[in-house]
């Protein structure tokens, strides 16, 4: 039986409609949420992603500032830019697009972002708050995965969820979110050193593939009826975007699956908008 396609594009459009309404309501109170995106150098993928974030925030009626710095920007210069944005009253959310050029230290930069403006949720303080079960912001991609699971009708409480990938951007924060009280999943984090990845995935009601390896998850690794979320954003030989999941094969086994493109991707940018809205509310009088 062919799996149901979980349409991230349609879900993202619905969530954005709701965010736009909330931005309009805030405007009546004289508040415009402001997002600043910092990009260093001209990595083509990063340029595309930052452009998408810029357009999305403008379309939703937010203030959008794009700070483009040359590839030879020094650590001190980048840190000064972050400090200025921290102090800028018009800016509610700050993100520094990754990867940075090799001579720059991303961890140090992320640590400097004011936690109240850390809409990317990559500051160790923000990650730590989530890890101790008292979250401030949710990282954008995992936050999008939560909504996609809800959209697919997955009851996370008690579900066995295998996440393939242990990155700070996706795997680790997603595991922390899914084990929060209220989500209550039983989570396994698999990674490149996991023995018998197929067996670990076959035990799961939900497989989240976030390893960054084209075609890693094949039909024989998925239990019949499982839900599969593909976070992969890889390029194949002809340059087109592909995920970590063998979509055609796994669709024959799973009950629901996200496509690439059109699954997780549109949700990532949308949840950044949600976090910016939440930051604007929180900075101007208590958490929403
Ligand atoms: N590079 C790839 N994904 C992301 C993201 O979610 N945030 C940032 N800052 N950089 C990224």
Image (tube, grey):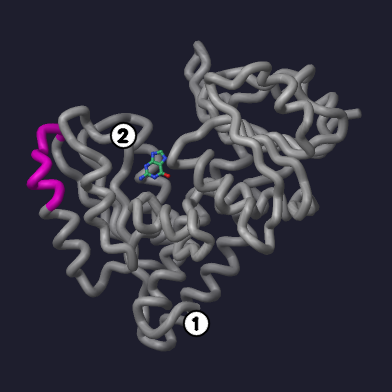
The residue at the far bottom in this view is 29
Q: Which residue is pictured at 20% across the width and 69% down the height?
A: 88
Q: Quadrant of residue 222?
A: top right
Q: Which residue is pictured at 32% across the width and 63% down the height?
A: 115
Labels 1, 2: front one: 2
Q: Which residue is pictured at 79% across the width and 17% down the height?
A: 220
Indicate the position of residue 268 as horizontal and vertical percent values: 51, 48
The stretch in magenta equals 71-79
**Relative to 194, 23 lies left or right:** left
Tell which circle, 1 or 2, labels the residue nearer the N-terminal end: 1
Image quarter hosting the N terminus: top right
Tell me the distance, in whole angstroms, between the alpha carbons under discs 1 and 2.
Answer: 35 Å
Q: Which residue is pictured at 21% across the width and 64% down the height?
A: 86
Can you identify the residue that label 1 sits on?
25
Is 76 one of the magenta-colored residues?
yes
Circle 1 crowding by C-alpha within 10 Å: few under 14, some 14–19, many from 20: few
Q: Compared with residue 62, is residue 41 higher up or lower down, i.e. above or below?
A: above
Q: Which quadrant of the render holds ligand 1? A: top left
Is 266 one of the magenta-colored residues?
no
Q: Compared with residue 50, is residue 255 higher up or lower down, i.e. above or below?
A: above
Secondary-structure class at tag 1? helix
Pointers 1 and 2 in contact (C-beta within 8 Å): no
Q: Quadrant of residue 207?
A: top right
The residue at the far right in this view is 1
Indicate the position of residue 52 as horizontal and vertical percent values: 42, 46
Indicate the position of residue 143 as horizontal and vertical percent values: 56, 53
**Relative to 85, 138 lies left or right:** right
Can you identify the residue that label 2 sits on?
99
Secondary-structure class at tag 2? loop
Whether the residue carrying mark 2 lies under 8 Å from ligand 1 is answered with: yes
**Relative to 54, 81 lies left or right:** left
């Amino acid at each position: 039986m062919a799996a149901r396609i979980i349409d991230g594009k349609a879900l993202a459009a619905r969530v954005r409609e709701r965010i736009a309404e909330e931005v309009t309501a805030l405007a009546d109170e004289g508040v415009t949420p402001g997002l600043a995106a910092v990009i260093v150098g001209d990595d083509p993928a990063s340029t595309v992603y930052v452009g998408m974030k810029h357009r999305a925030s403008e379309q939703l009626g937010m203030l959008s500032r794009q700070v483009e710095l040359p590839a030879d920007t020094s650590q001190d210069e980048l840190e000064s830019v972050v400090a200025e944005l921290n102090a800028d009253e018009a800016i509610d959310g700050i993100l520094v697009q990754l990867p940075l050029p090799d001579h720059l230290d991303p961890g140090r930069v992320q640590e400097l972002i004011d936690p109240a403006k850390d809409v990317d949720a990559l500051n160790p303080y923000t990650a730590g708050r989530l890890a101790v079960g008292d979250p401030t912001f949710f990282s954008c991609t995992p936050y999008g995965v939560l909504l996609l699971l809800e959209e697919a009708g997955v009851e996370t409480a008690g579900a066995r969820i295998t996440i393939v990938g242990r990155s700070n951007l996706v795997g680790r924060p997603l595991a922390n979110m899914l084990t929060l009280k209220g989500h209550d999943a039983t989570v396994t984090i698999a990674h490149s050193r996991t023995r018998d990845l197929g067996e670990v995935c076959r035990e799961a009601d939900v497989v989240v593939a976030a390893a960054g390896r084209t075609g890693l998850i094949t039909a024989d690794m998925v239990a019949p009826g499982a839900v599969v979320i593909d976070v992969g954003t890889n390029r194949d030989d002809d340059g087109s975007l592909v995920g970590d999941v063998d979509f055609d094969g796994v669709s024959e086994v799973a009950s629901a699956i996200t496509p690439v493109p059109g699954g997780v991707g549109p949700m990532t940018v949308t949840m950044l908008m949600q976090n910016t809205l939440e930051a604007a509310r929180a900075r101007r009088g208590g958490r929403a």
